[in-house]
Image (cartoon, rainbow, N blue to C red):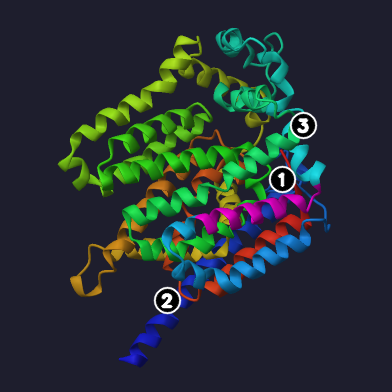
Amino acid sequence: MIRFRHRDLDRDLRRDLYAVLAAALLVTAAVLAGRHIQDTRHTLFVHWPPLFADWDPHLGPGTPAALAVAAATVAYGPALAVRLSFRALLAAAWATALAWIFSLAWIDGWQRGIAGRLTTANEYLRVIGRFHDIPATLRDFTHHIVDGTPAPWPAHIAGHPPAATLTFVLLDRTGLHGGGWAGMFVIVTGATGCVAVLVALRALADEKLARRAAPFLVLAPAAVWQGVSADGYFAAVAAWSVALLALAVTRRSLWCAAASGLLFGLTCYLSYGLALFALTGAAVLVLGRSGLRQRPVLLLPLLAGLAVFPVVFALAGFNWWQAYHLLVTRYYQGVGGTRPYGYWVWANLACTAVITGPATAAGLRRTTAALLRGRGPRTTRPAAAHVRLAFLVTATVLALLTADLSGMSKAETERIWLPFALWLLPACALLPRPRAWLTAQAALALLLNHLLFTGW
């Protein structure tokens, strides 16, 4: 029996490594093909394809801290995730994620890595002065999306609903002026995303899997982008909308249902593409259908919360659908109309492989196997919690693939897809030997941040 078990473990490990090799080959192909296309046709508009980055080997003030956080998390993370009370685990996960994200950003220095990121030409802080009259600006917002209109918005402002920019406008109005405060806001809020995913995993799968996932959620290569892009903040808001929905259906809480709807509504007004999180939310409702059957009234506060932001913005004069269609026009006016769909439709997936790391490639293989075996003979079925985790992860994979096929996410998906990446990382909970996989995750993140200078 023991020999048979060892053979199974060795076979699974080989398959995990095959999945990692496939991901590595995908990234390698994207790099080589991307270099050729960019050098010959100049149509990718990225300097280090498939990532929007420049080759820039360097060390920085955050290097010692990043190495220390990585080493401590690899050495002690898996054991502490088992021993701590769950509430203490959530606090520890947030604090460690915060330290990891900040230290990686700090490798590039305070100004280049944190304070200056949201003040560049296409970023949100550049237009704060145009929001001196917020109601009037919202009424006029869609008139400046398309290139050729008077005073068109910079790319990121035009590319997102106004709640994204309003976040930083309101931050400025509270007295927290400048890129330093904005950067720290993104880092602090972005670090809570891992806590939201842990809360959801415990509610929908089981506590043991949530504990096993915790170090991987903390030490993700995605942290390279979480602290330097507003998409890290968007990812946290989307994650909490899912986590609160999970609590609503498992605890049958009306308050959690209302809060989930409210945050999902906000998510849709932070980024158009994050409306696809409805697929992840639908998976939560399927997994929590017993709670819904016992208390169907949960749908009422959920829908009421969901309506708040659409109603507020509609009354303010902003039309989400009209703005989205204008954005499509703006997208194809710019580099989005030149970047080749035939390359990015698969190179985007290479970007995802980079930000989620080799452990996630292996974990996704295991979630796929869990789903396929979930309907097989009872003697070979995986644990029910594993199937539930696999179902949640797969729903997010479908959302990501939908975004990919839409053609509206050509390049820069290492930051744009951060909200989806956060829900792929739990697949790592199915992996044995967590320290080896965590080492690979940390090594990739450190190499990325020390060899490249990322930007957008």
Q: Which is closer to the viewer, label 3 or label 1?
A: 3
Q: What stretch is highlighted in magenta?
A: 91-109
Mark 3 or mark 2: which comes first in sequence? Answer: 2
**Considering depth in this image, is 136 or 172 the residue closer to the camera?**
172
| Secondary structure, magenta segment, majority class | helix
Q: What element carries label 2?
A: helix
Q: Residue at x 74, y 49 (%)?
A: 48
How many marks on residues? 3
Q: In this view, does 119 lie above or below 348?
A: above
Q: Is residue 217 above or below residue 434?
A: above
Between the residue at mark 3 and the residue at mark 1, the CA separation in whole angstroms equals: 27 Å
Dot 3 corresponds to which residue? Answer: 120
**Considering depth in this image, is 68 or 453 the residue closer to the camera?**
68
Dot 1 corresponds to which residue? Answer: 37
Dot 2 corresponds to which residue? Answer: 12
Q: Which residue is drawn at 42% across and 33% down?
A: 264
Q: Do the residues labelled 2 and 1 touch (CB within 8 Å)?
A: no
Q: In this view, does 255 lie above or below 348?
A: above
**Label 2 neighbour load within 10 Å: few <14, some 14-19, many 20+:** some
Mark 2 or mark 1: which comes first in sequence? Answer: 2
Between the residue at mark 2 and the residue at mark 1, the CA separation in whole angstroms equals: 37 Å
Q: In this view, does 347 lie above or below 156?
A: below
Q: Which amino acid type is shown beneath numbered disc 2?
A: Asp
Mark 3 or mark 1: which comes first in sequence? Answer: 1
- Residue 90: x and y in percent read 48, 56
Inspect this view and state whether residue 360 appears: no
Inspect this view and state whether residue 164 appears: yes
Q: Residue at x 48, y 71 (%)?
A: 16
- Residue 324: x and y in percent read 51, 21
Residue 215 vs residue 402: left or right?
right
